[in-house]
Image (cartoon, rainbow, N blue to C red):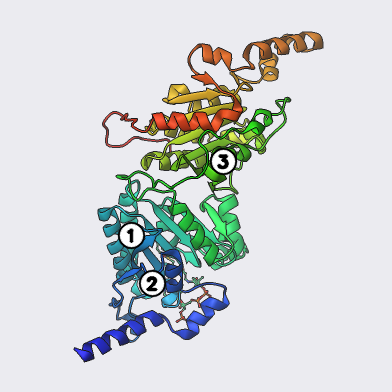
């Protein structure tokens, strides 16, 4: 017995050592934590239960039988974040560069299966050189097993990926199928093929940072949902995000005690919309003033900034916010903003998170770049996502709701439950100037005539009442009472239940 206990301790020590002190030191020198340090920081203190600590690879090619490290380059198990259960894997770059072998994949698959079975999120801390080169097709098969599980778990449990080192090849495709990807600035990269291969194939000379660093993926490609200064901040922010999310699609989002007044009045909102309709204002201010304690978790903050996607809480419960941002491109819908918001709406709907939509949209962005890029299909994604969503939907039109974009932004016609408008709302096919230019094309030289027609059009449509008369707007509300009205609306929708026609799955315009 004593000798087994002794052996156990020895084996545990060997597993905890990973690829050795020298490689761990290198990890620290690069400003990165080790796989185990990351798990410790992510989870509640002392809550981590490890699986498969003694699993090692079975490869015998390239003298690999002499290079076995217990754990095989990935730490797996479960623990809690603020008392709620999470499954975690953390790749160990000190062991064969965190590369994925057959057994490494099996370890990840085991906790993914348990997460789906037991209804708890999966958080992957990725730091991997991709397929373990020595294992060949066995490693590719391992990746595919993980991918298949990512797909099956999608919409069942939240899946979060944190990219914490160089991730290449297969190491980026599993994260790509998860719900949210976060990166660490200056130490994490994601690419299908690295700079060397790029140079060989396309002759382009590019650094790893430019090709697949955090800035690239949060502002250009939109592959990542956020980037953080270092490992510690990234893991702390993931903890904060998890506090907003339900454990699985069978459970409601967590209720958090709140200390904010539900009836809080925000007089400043009465003057936030400028008198001149061409001037912008910051929609983030509206979101902060709406949220419990002003607590906002924004996603994709650096990409398609003309639309904002964020989680907040109202009366202690999680709400997804989609809001046009008049500060950027006048808040218009374009390819990027439509894709960004559509994915967020679908996440909220999959996990029963109510959606609040704040609308100030002058329409879809015109032009060849947009048309050639397929704005028709991308805009349809957002339209489709809103239309299929069965969660409570509360919409507030703060100013412009023009044209097709009015329809898209959770209008009454797409099963909006509560559609409010501020007195400053203008709901029309297009702005007055554009309308007059089309309706009176042959008389545009007559300035007085054009001014009179523009005034006439504004008089008729630049208000919320035409839509309210038809019941497309349920109520014109005063901006200062927005928090109170939205909270009341959502609380009346707590037991909302609608379903879509039975089908295998829909065919969203991908
Ligand atoms: C086995 C690997 C490895 C891999 C790195 N290592 N990648 N071992 N398989 N894929 C090992 C190295 O041999 C080294 O071992 C240690 O990890 C650290 O690697 P370094 O190169 O010294 O580190 P660094 O300079 O930081 O570079 C990291 C890296 C680079 C950018 C990840 O190692 C690299 O480019 N690796 C190969 C990436 C790749 O092409 N992967 C295959 C992709 S194909 P020692 O013993 O010296 O510490 C793929 C197919 C799946 O994934 C497709 C599914 C759709």
Q: Is residue 338 visible?
A: no
Number of residues whose C-alpha sits closer than 10 Å to that of mark 1, classed few (under 14), some (14–19) or many (20 or more): many
Q: Residue furthest left?
A: 1
Mark 2: C-beta under 8 Å from nearest atom of ligand 1: yes
Q: Give the image location of residue 187, x and y in percent.
A: 56, 67
Q: Is residue 102 left or right of residue 333?
A: left
The label number, if any, that marks residue 170 in the structure image: none
**Discs 2, 3 touching: Cβ within 8 Å:** no
Residue for badge 3: 308
**Circle 3: is it few (<14), some (14-19), or many (20+) Cα within 10 Å?**
many
Indicate the position of residue 97 as horizontal and vertical percent values.
Answer: 45, 74
Real-space CA distance between mark 3 and mark 1, rounded to the nearest whole angstrom: 32 Å
The quadrant in which the C terminus is found is top left
**Does dot 3 land on a helix, a strand or a loop?**
strand
* Disc 2: which residue: 132
Q: Nearer the viewer, residue 388 or 142?
A: 388
Q: Nearer the viewer, mark 2 or mark 3?
A: 3
Spatial CA distance of label 1 from label 2 is 14 Å
Picture coordinates of residue 8, whole percent (x, y): 27, 84
- Residue found 53% across the figure and 33% down from its top: 263
Q: Earlier in the sequence, mark 2 or mark 3?
A: 2
Secondary structure under badge 2?
loop
Q: Nearer the viewer, residue 381 or 498?
A: 498
**Label 2 crowding class (10 Å Cα cut-off): few <14, some 14-19, many 20+?**
many
Image position, residue 386 (x, y; %): 44, 32
* Residue 434 visible, this orientation: yes
Question: Residues under labels 2 and 3: Cα distance?
Answer: 39 Å
Q: Relative to 307, is 415 above or below?
A: above
Q: Residue furthest bottom?
A: 3
Circle 1 sits on which residue? 146
Task: Work out which quarter of the rendered image holds the N terminus and state it.
Answer: bottom left
């Amino acid at each position: 017995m004593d000798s087994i206990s002794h052996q156990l301790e020895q084996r545990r020590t060997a597993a905890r050592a990973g690829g050795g002190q020298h490689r761990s030191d290198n990890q620290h020198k690069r400003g990165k934590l080790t796989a185990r340090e990351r798990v410790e920081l992510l989870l509640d203190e002392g809550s981590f239960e490890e699986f498969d600590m003694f699993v090692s690879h079975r490869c015998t090619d390239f003298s690999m039988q002499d290079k076995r490290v217990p754990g095989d380059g990935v730490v797996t198990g479960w623990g809690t974040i603020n008392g709620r259960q999470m499954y975690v894997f953390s790749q160990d770059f000190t062991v064969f560069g965190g590369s994925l072998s057959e057994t490494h994949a099996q370890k990840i698959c085991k906790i993914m299966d348990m997460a789906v079975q037991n209804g708890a999120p999966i958080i992957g801390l990725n730091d991997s050189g991709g397929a373990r080169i020595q294992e060949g097709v066995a490693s590719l098969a391992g990746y595919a097993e993980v991918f298949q599980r990512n797909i099956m778990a999608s919409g069942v449990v939240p899946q979060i990926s944190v990219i914490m080192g160089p991730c290449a090849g297969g190491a980026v495709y599993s994260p790509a199928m998860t719900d949210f990807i976060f990166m660490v600035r200056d130490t994490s990269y994601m690419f299908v093929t690295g700079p060397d291969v790029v140079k060989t194939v396309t002759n382009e000379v590019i650094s790893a940072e430019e090709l697949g660093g955090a800035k690239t993926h949060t502002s250009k490609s939109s592959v990542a949902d956020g980037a953080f200064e270092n490992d510690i901040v990234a893991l702390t922010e993931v903890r904060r995000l998890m506090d907003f999310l339900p454990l699985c699609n069978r459970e409601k989002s967590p209720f958090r005690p709140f200390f904010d007044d539900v009836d809080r009045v925000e007089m400043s909102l009465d003057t936030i919309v400028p008198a001149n309709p061409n001037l912008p204002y910051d929609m983030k201010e509206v979101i902060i003033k709406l949220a419990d304690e002003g607590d906002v978790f924004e996603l994709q903050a650096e990409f398609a900034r003309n639309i904002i996607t964020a989680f907040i809480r109202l009366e202690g419960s999680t709400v997804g916010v989609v809001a046009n941002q008049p500060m950027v491109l006048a808040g218009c819908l374009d390819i990027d903003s439509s894709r960004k918001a559509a994915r967020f709406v679908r996440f909220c709907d999959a996990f029963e998170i109510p959606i609040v939509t704040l609308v100030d949209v002058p329409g879809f962005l015109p032009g060849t770049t947009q048309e050639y890029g397929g704005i028709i299909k991308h805009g349809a994604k957002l339209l489709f996502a809103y239309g299929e969503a069965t969660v409570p939907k509360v919409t507030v039109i703060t100013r412009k709701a023009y044209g097709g974009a009015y329809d898209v932004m959770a209008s009454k016609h797409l099963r909006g439950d509560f559609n409010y408008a501020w007195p400053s709302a203008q709901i029309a096919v297009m702005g007055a100037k554009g309308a007059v230019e089309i309706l009176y094309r042959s008389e545009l030289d007559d300035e007085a005539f054009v001014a009179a027609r523009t005034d006439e059009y504004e008089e008729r449509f630049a208000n919320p009442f035409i839509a309210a008369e038809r019941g497309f707007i349920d109520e014109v509300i005063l901006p200062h009472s927005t928090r109170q009205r939205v909270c009341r609306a959502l609380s009346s929708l707590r037991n909302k239940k609608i379903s879509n026609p039975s089908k295998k799955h829909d065919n969203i315009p991908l």
